Amino acid sequence: MSSNIRNFSIIAHIDHGKSTLADRMLELTGTIEKREMRDQVLDRMDLERERGITIKMQPVRMEWKNTQLNLIDTPGHVDFAYEVSRALSAVEGVVLLVDATQGVEAQTLSVLATAKELGRVIIPVVNKIDAPHARTEDVKSEISLLIGCDEDEILATSGKTGAGVTELLDAIIERIPPPETSGDKLQALIYDFSYSDHRGVIIYCRLFGGKVSKGDSLKLAAANATFNALEVGILAPDEEARESLNEGEIGYIVTGIKRPGVASVGDTLVAARMSAPALGGYRQPAPVIWASVYPESQDDLVQLRQALERLRLTDSSLSYEEESSGVMGKGFRCGFLGMLHLEIVVERLKREFDLPLVVTMPTTVYELTLANGAIEEIYNPARFPDDGTVKAVREPWVALAVMTPPQYLGGISQIMFDHEAVVGDTETLPDGKVKVNAEMPLRELMRTFFDKLKSVSSGFASLSYEPIGLRSADVVRLDVLVAEELVPAFARIVSKRRVGHEAEALVENLEKLLPKQLFELKIQAKTGGKIIASRRKSAMRKDVTGYLYGGDITRKMKLLEKQKKGKKKMLARGKVDIPHDVFLKVIKGGE
Ligand SMILES: Nc1nc2c(ncn2[C@@H]2O[C@H](COP(=O)(O)OP(=O)(O)OP(=O)(O)O)[C@@H](O)[C@H]2O)c(=O)[nH]1
Ligand SMILES: [Mg+2]
């Protein structure tokens, strides 16, 4: 049976055309009718469609020349590398795409390394060959040097026109081996989930051995939880129920489990009796940055906890822990894989669960040695001591590889200097691009370094990084006061050499973003007990409700009454309402 199955993934640097190529495969194999087709059809979340990026891996079953093809599309953004590694543990081979107009980029190297490490068969492909600036032949030779293959092993495709896609589907059947199976006993690796109120947790898995049918009694090995399969089926790309799933296949199983925290990615699904041993599983991803998320009203705390539990089912790289802060009450300290991940999670919480939230400035972790010798880890800037009780601070650093055409080196050196990078050696690659190796504090990488890199290189430079441990840090806490009240959510930890500049930029930005009040608004930045920057925002000229309601005093009173109620609920706020989007903008701006 499984000799007619091929499991593969498409991997590439961001935007090199993975999802668009998948569209053409779905069309050619007749999986999706042409009239039902839309661009990047596998990008199913609203957020993915709006931003034109893939956030979650997405499996889909196709049929080609009597062979069952299970494709898993993967995201290309560096924050979602964990999705790629999970997808790759469910497949035997990969299609490695390289954009013919861009050539090999930083993430090309890192996804290739992941595929090699796992011993996956690699089919190299030059994509976007239709594009006016395609350098198909040059890029072929870059790839052949990179992976040490012959140029004639490299395929050429266009996800836009469909050129070369038939040949690619044939090559997948020829070059990628059918799944090897581990025997008759059920052994399925869980690589993802979804959740529905009616059906509970829905498991997405790859069967390495055995078979699972509707009604079977099953067990999650690590969680030691049993359940009956309420439904089994495949994703095409919508769920399609089947009688059973067989060894080597990829599909879904409806569990009915509604308790949170039972199912985890990387667990093995086995038969409830006579069970096979668990499979290898996955490494837990290590969060890179943390931010605290508080409900605007403490009444929503339980709801926020539920929302996070729910979200974690579909995003296993999110981690969180309850915490409480004096001013803001109870909330959650959440760990993220990067700034984009943070932004996506906050946006999803807001949209999918409709919760007004306060999110603190994201920060990396700091290891403090206190005057009494005790060692403490700080994840929340508002808790960073500001009173001289700290003897030493260490913070995480990363090793960075930047690939760029040489003409942008000047600009890149400048931003590296601004971001406290220690620049190492540079190499010139076969295509003339330069690879710069450097080390920098993770804090500085998170301070919009990536956006600046893109802008000084007109989008041509690319970046990958990995953690290299803790180093000593020269940082202080910077506080913000609005109308003479501390706003803990705006507190941040900044390097001493930049504190003045950062304070100025911050008050200036807030002056722009905060809405006018009925009184003159004071916005101040403070460090070590001293105000170091300050701005005043002038008061509103007249009562705006006046003209809106044409003097209808009862309606106006009602409105004011309503506002008063709203305000009472808002624990995180003082005299001044700080709108949610201001929080988000300040955090995103990173300055
Ligand atoms: N000219 C041309 N443009 C393409 C082709 N394939 C994709 N594009 C364009 O490239 C952009 C990115 O395409 P996607 O398919 O979303 O790329 P991706 O690799 O899935 O991106 P991520 O999932 O975010 O990493 C879109 O604007 C596409 O229209 C192609 O074959 N030719
Ligand atoms: Mg995509």
Image (tube, rainbow, N blue to C red):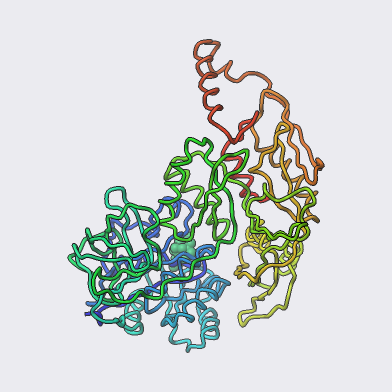
Percent from the top left, x then y, of residue 25?
A: 33, 69
From the viewer's side, name the closer residue of 98 and 490: 490
Percent from the top left, x then y, of residue 56?
A: 43, 60
Residue located 74% across and 72% down the image: 423
For the N terminus, which image quadrant? bottom left
Q: Is residue 236 visible?
A: no
Percent from the top left, x then y, of residue 410?
A: 75, 67
The residue sitting at the front extreme is 372
Looking at the image, in which quadrant does ligand 2 appear? bottom left
Residue located 38% across and 63% down the image: 192
From the viewer's side, name the closer residue of 574 and 44: 574
Residue located 46% across and 78% down the image: 115
From the viewer's side, name the closer residue of 106 and 39: 106
Question: Image height check: is 283 above or below 155?
Answer: above
From the viewer's side, name the closer residue of 387 and 119: 387
Question: Image height check: is 508 above or below 192?
Answer: above
Q: Quadrant of residue 442 in the image?
A: bottom right
Q: Is residue 452 left or right of residue 94?
A: right
Q: How many numbered discs sit on the rendered protein?
A: 0
Q: Is residue 175 visible?
A: yes
Q: Is residue 345 left or right of residue 200?
A: right
Residue located 50% across and 38% down the image: 356
Question: Image height check: is 573 above or below 360?
Answer: above
Percent from the top left, x then y, of residue 357?
A: 53, 41
Q: Quadrant of residue 90 in the image?
A: bottom left
